[in-house]
Image (cartoon, rainbow, N blue to C red):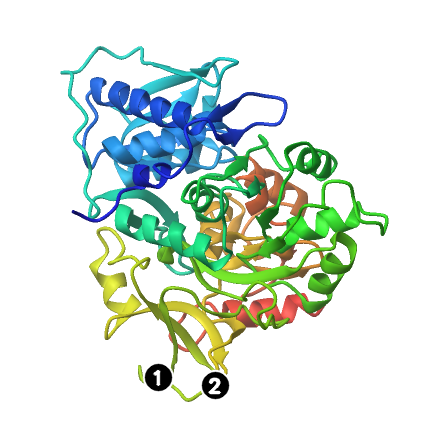
Amino acid sequence: MGEPILVDLLAGGAPEATAIAVPGGPSITYSQLRAEVEKAAATLAAFGLSRNDRIAFVLPNSIETVVLFLASATVGTAAPLNPAYKEDEFRFYLEDMGARALVVRRGESEAARRALPEGVRVIEVDVDPTGALSLSSPASEAARRTVEAPSGDDVALVLHTSGTTSRPKQVPLRHRNLTYSARNIARTYSLSAADVAMCVMPLFHIHGLMASTMATFSTGDTVVVPPRFDPMSFWPQAQAHGATWYSAVPTIHQMLLMRNRGERPPGAERLRFIRSSSSALSPATMHELESRFGAPVIEAYGMTEASHQMASNPLPPGDRRAGSVGRATGIEIGVMDDAGALVNAGDAGEVVIRGASVIDGYANNATVNAEAFVDGWFRTGDQGRLTDDGYLSLVGRLKEMINRGGEKIAPREIDEVLLQHPAVSEAVAFASPHERWGEEVAAAVVLKGDATEKDLIKFARERLADYKVPSRLYIVDQIPRTATGKIQRRSVAATLNSQ
């Protein structure tokens, strides 16, 4: 028997058990979910799509997003995109991945439609009140195909992750990577058919897809999928569906705390645990969550290139350590020095990983792959320390990525947009500390013409998703550089963040 594939994760769900529940919308059972995935896959194949074709979709969190993810991964390769992208961003990602089709809701996603490269098929999706999907395409019919079952080595999902000095990199995740990760997460938290997960992370991110959704399916439990996170409706929805856990970035935890008056909210009474991942959680926030919501907080460590989870603190009565992301879960974790040698416990260095959920390499990027892998270890770009008993603490990032509440933003992308303004001669974006988001986007520019901070922010807002737009913009006389002419991004950040 070959390596498992994603749809295999649905096999354990009892036919009449609820697989997906949408607050205020439809719920579907495992039997319905399996049927909808099979039907959608057959339709995608009938539209001429097949193995290795990149099938992009721009959808909010919904039943159709989950179905299209599984169906696209069965027929070809799923490629979810952030609905908040602007037209230029959609154009880049669609062209870079070589998308063969774009799936959108009927009458929605105009920016993505305008950005379509020539020859890309538009497929529209509708869902009825029972949760049943229908797919249609105005394009002429291609030669009809049947669904060819994928193998564990086939690429199921492609996402982009950004570097600080290069264009965003394509991360191809294979069926075997993702199925291993889902089962690994379920094992870590002892998930069972009695659990109900609240999915508050977007389903175009690995966190929402793996931790909240696919791990849930692997043990036959229910995932509750609101269209978007709303701190005002979160607890009523959790109460209505009997939520037993949720996973989120620290920003979402903090938003829930801000709207809490100190008492345990109705809806928290069934929580077994609260999971936090994708950016650092302060010990103070961890303790406040536990005292307000009455459930243990489990901090974990994940990244796209590892199909999400790499390490986690254990459930009680295990040793949960505030300020640590826990021990390796299902993969190996090491800490390496600049020479590529593993260091002793307690010494700081670059966190490196290897294991079944880790990618084989970035797509079409031999140069980056040569730098990213050392003797079979993948370099995360994070700096950390391991204790004698294997607990990992992150002490910084070697990369200059901006981490805004779990959204990873490449500074160079912001630079390039600002440099398109005719009054800007130089631009450098960097992370600025922020109480809620952890970090926010700031930028410094050197002008060659007339422009104000307001003009430049307006210019950026027209070309970037809102979360990427600089919240602070400094107009400076010059930007520090090294002797070889490279921008000293960290020096700019240190100087301007102290003002």
Residue 327: x and y in percent read 48, 71
Q: Residues within 10 Å of mark 2 (few under 14, many from 20)?
A: few
Circle 2 residue: 388
Residue 446: x and y in percent read 56, 57
Circle 1 residue: 342
Three-letter code for the amino acid on which mark 2 is drawn: Asp
For image coordinates 72% across by 40% down, the residue present is 267
Marks 1/2: CA distance?
A: 14 Å
Q: Quadrant of residue 340?
A: bottom left
Q: Quadrant of residue 482?
A: bottom left
> Looking at the image, which is closer to me, 190 or 112?
190
Q: Residues within 10 Å of mark 1 (few under 14, many from 20)?
A: some
Location of the C terminus by quadrant is bottom right
Drawn side of residue 215 relative to residue 116, left or right: right
Q: Quadrant of residue 371?
A: bottom left
Relative to residue 69, is residue 322 depicted above or below?
Answer: below
For image coordinates 24% across by 71% down, the residue present is 376
Relative to residue 351, is residue 236 depicted above or below?
Answer: above
State whether residue 7 appears in this view: yes
For image coordinates 67% across by 38% down, the residue present is 238
> Looking at the image, which is closer to me, 344 or 113?
344
Which of label 1 and label 2 is nearer to you? 2
For image coordinates 69% across by 62% down, the residue present is 286
